[in-house]
Image: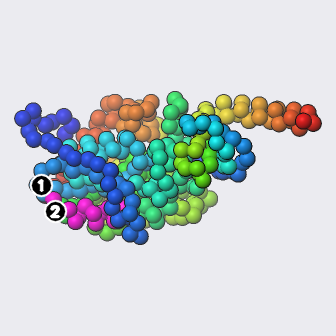
Amino acid sequence: MWNSFTTDSHVSVTAEITTFKGGNGDEIHAYVAHPIDDYRRGGIVLIHHMPGWDEFYEEFAERLARHGYDVICPDLYCRVGHGTSDDVTAKVRAQGGIADDSVVADCAAALDYLKALPTSNGKVGVMGTCSGGRHSLLVASLVPGFTAVIDLWGGNVIMAEDQLTPQRPVPVIDYTEKLTIPLLGLFGNDDKSPAPEQVDQHEAELKRLNKDYEFHRYDGAGHGFMYYQNQMYRQEQAMDATEKVFAFWAKQLAN
Amino acid sequence: MCTMIASTTKVQGAGKGSNGWFPITQATVGYDHASHCDDDHAMLLDFVNYDLGTDARVAVELDLNSARALVEQLNIAIDLAAKSGV
């Protein structure tokens, strides 16, 4: 739970930008955050959103680390260049986005990175917001070895034929059959992508295939309702979602 | 939502960015999450020269009505410029 530490507890984390061998063995940047103690614990691959590998994600990684997890957030845009996150994102936007294959490869490498840590208990989750939510589903479906997945309002899980691109050639919903791990999905009912009808469609597919999932949907919230850095933020819904995220990881990544 | 609406075109001209004037070679027009303007989504205009680095960029974010107004004024100015014979 958020804000549940005792004032005499020892909660200390370290966080830094580092590099690691991502997909294809490319040395790419990542933000890693760890509790400094050496107790065994779960890990989380945190997939950043389309707006970029930005300070929200640094803070998100640190928040998860403060709650006892080893976290790695790869810079999926690393190969495009370096600069401020919005400058790099603009360049990614100009080239049509990052290929799904590249994201999958980098996150598979991030999974290996976490499992190789001496503190790893062998359990690793994957999560993200917005396009990171979509990517989390994609990675969870295609990369064996993850323990559980959280999709925070991932749009474009369902895509029509004419929406597919060379970077995103397959609708993520088509991979639902391959998903074998528990899924938590959190959505705002005022969101346009994913719209409630699309979440219904996704849920119907999960039910049809008898998948282990739980969805929660929030009234009065649209896309990005946990983004405290902009007007999308909805305090009550965001805090409830935060607690659901922590509770899910506490259950799925426990020793 | 991530619309992934974006297209690019080569351009010739100059832009003034955080490091002063520089030659611009490409313009990207997108409609997606805004970084700084008040709307969730905005028309995203990037005038760039990636030969000079990712920060060789003049960025503008506009709401849709403003984007329409800009297009209208651009077209007016282009017509007048063409008729001016200059």
| Residue furthest left in the image | A8
Q: Which mark is residue B29?
A: none
Task: Name the quadrant containing residue A22.
Answer: bottom left
Where's residue A148, x and y in %?
28, 58
A46 above or below B86? below
Which amino acid type is shown beneath numbered disc 2? Pro
Residue A52 visible in the shown view: yes
Which amino acid type is shown beneath numbered disc 1? Asp
- So how many labels did they put on this image? 2
Where's residue A203, x and y in %?
40, 54
Residue that mark 1 sits on:
A38
Task: Name the quadrant containing residue B15.
Answer: top right
The residue located at (33%, 61%) in the rendering is A20
Q: How many residues crowd around disc 1 within 10 Å: few (fewer than 14), some, or many (20 or more)?
A: few
Q: Quadrant of the C terminus of chain B?
A: top right
Left or right: residue A36 compared with residue A88: left
Residue that mark 2 sits on:
A118
Residue A94 visible in the shown view: no
The residue located at (60%, 53%) in the rendering is B51
Labels 2 and 1 share a subunit: yes
Left or right: residue A179 compared with residue A114: right
Disc 2, SS: loop
Question: What chain does mark 2 sit on?
Answer: A
Q: CA distance from mark 2 to mark 1?
A: 8 Å
Left or right: residue A24 compared with residue B58: left
Any magenta on residue A109? Answer: yes
Disc 1, SS: loop
- Whether pointer 2 and pointer 1 mark residues with C-beta atoms closer than 8 Å, the reply is yes
A237 above or below A28? above
Left or right: residue A21 compared with residue A33: right
Segment colored magenta: A107-119
